[in-house]
Amino acid sequence: VTIAQMFAGIAKDLTKLGGKTVTKIVTPEGRHTRLFQLVSLLTGWKNSLKGVGYFLGSALLEVSYEAALGFMIGLIVIAMPFAIFGLDKNLGTAKKKNSSLKEIFVLDNFNLNVLSLARLFLFASRDFWFEVPLPFYLRSPNCLALGPFFPCSPQDIDQCTTGAVCDPTLDYCTNVNEGGGCGGTGLGKVVVGAFLGGYIILYGQVQSWTPQLVTNPLQQTPPNKVTEVFWGMINCFPTMVGAIVVYASGVFVDYILGGMIAWLVVIIVTFAIIFAINSSIHSFLVVKYAKSDKVATSVGFYYMSNAVGRLVGT
C-alpha cells in the first residue's frame, strides 16, 4: 500500500507541476493579474475535486478497499482521453534541452528560495495537526465509555459508543482503531470522510475565487510579498484560538459533544478560508518568480519543498 501511495503521489505532483507550468506559458509577459486568476482557478478546482475524491473514497471503503481503488482507477481512465487528444502536443516540450539533476538544485533564484522555505513551514504547520491527528480525533470515542466498566457482548454491536467496538477476547468496549487513543468525537467513517472532504472542497473554492472575492476588494491584486506576509500572519490565529479552546474551554474539558463539534467546525472552516487565501497567493508568486525558460524546474523545486513540509508535519 505504501509503495502504491508513493507512485500515486508522484503522479499527482507531476499533474500539478504540468498545470502550474502551463499557466505561465499561456499568459503574456506582464499580465500578472490574469496569471493570478488562472493559477487560482486551476489550483482551486483541483483541490475541490480532490475533496470529492476524499469523500467518495471514505464512502466506498464501506463496501471494500478494492471497490474504492477500482472506482478511482475508472475516473482516471475516463480523464485520460481528454489529456491525450485534447492538449496541444507542444505543451511540455523543452525548447532547448531538458534540465539536468544538477540544474534543479542551482539555488540562484532568491525569491523562489524564500518562498519555498515558507511553503515548507506553511504545510508542515498544517499537516502537524490536520492530516493525521484530526481524523484520529474525529474517529476516537469518549474515554469514559471504554474499558472494563463497560462490558459488552460481541453479538450486540450497538452496546458500545460510536468509534468503539466490543472486543470478543475481553468482553468490553475498546477503540475501533488499535492505538487510536480516546477523547475524540467518535464520528463514523463516512461522516469523517464527509467532514474532511467538505474542508478540501471549501478550501479549493476559496482558492478559485481569491482574486475576485478577497484580493480585488482589498486592492491586493496582483499580490506581492507584502500581501503574503499579511495573510501569513493572519493564518496563525485560527490554530492559536483552536489550541486555547481545546485545552481551556469547558466544552472540551466536560466533553459536551455538540459543543465540541460546533467549535471544530468553526475553527476548521475559518482555517480553511485563510489557509486557502495563503496558498492561492503562494501558488501565484512561485509561478511569477519562476524564470520563463525554467518554469517546470522552478515549480518542481517549490513542490519538493511542499512535500518536505508535509513529511515533517506528519
Image: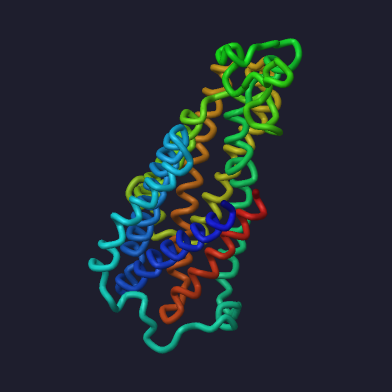
Evaluate whether residue 269 shows in this view. no
Residue drawn at point x = 59 percent, y = 39 percent: 237
Residue drawn at point x = 36 percent, y = 75 percent: 92
The picture places residue 193, in percent across and down from the top left corner, at 48, 35
Evaluate whether residue 16 shows in this view. yes
The picture places residue 241, in percent across and down from the top left corner, at 62, 33
Q: Nearer the viewer, residue 248 or 124?
A: 124
The picture places residue 50, in percent across and down from the top left corner, at 41, 47
Residue 284, picture quadrant: bottom left
Instruction: Using the image, determine if residue 30 lies above or below residue 247.
Output: below
Q: Nearer the viewer, residue 269 or 12?
A: 12
Q: Is 299 placed left or right of 240 in the picture?
A: left
Residue drawn at point x = 55 percent, y = 13 percent: 158
> How many tags in the picture?
0
Residue drawn at point x = 56 percent, y = 45 percent: 235
Residue 105, picture quadrant: bottom right
The residue furthest right is 148
The residue furthest left is 86
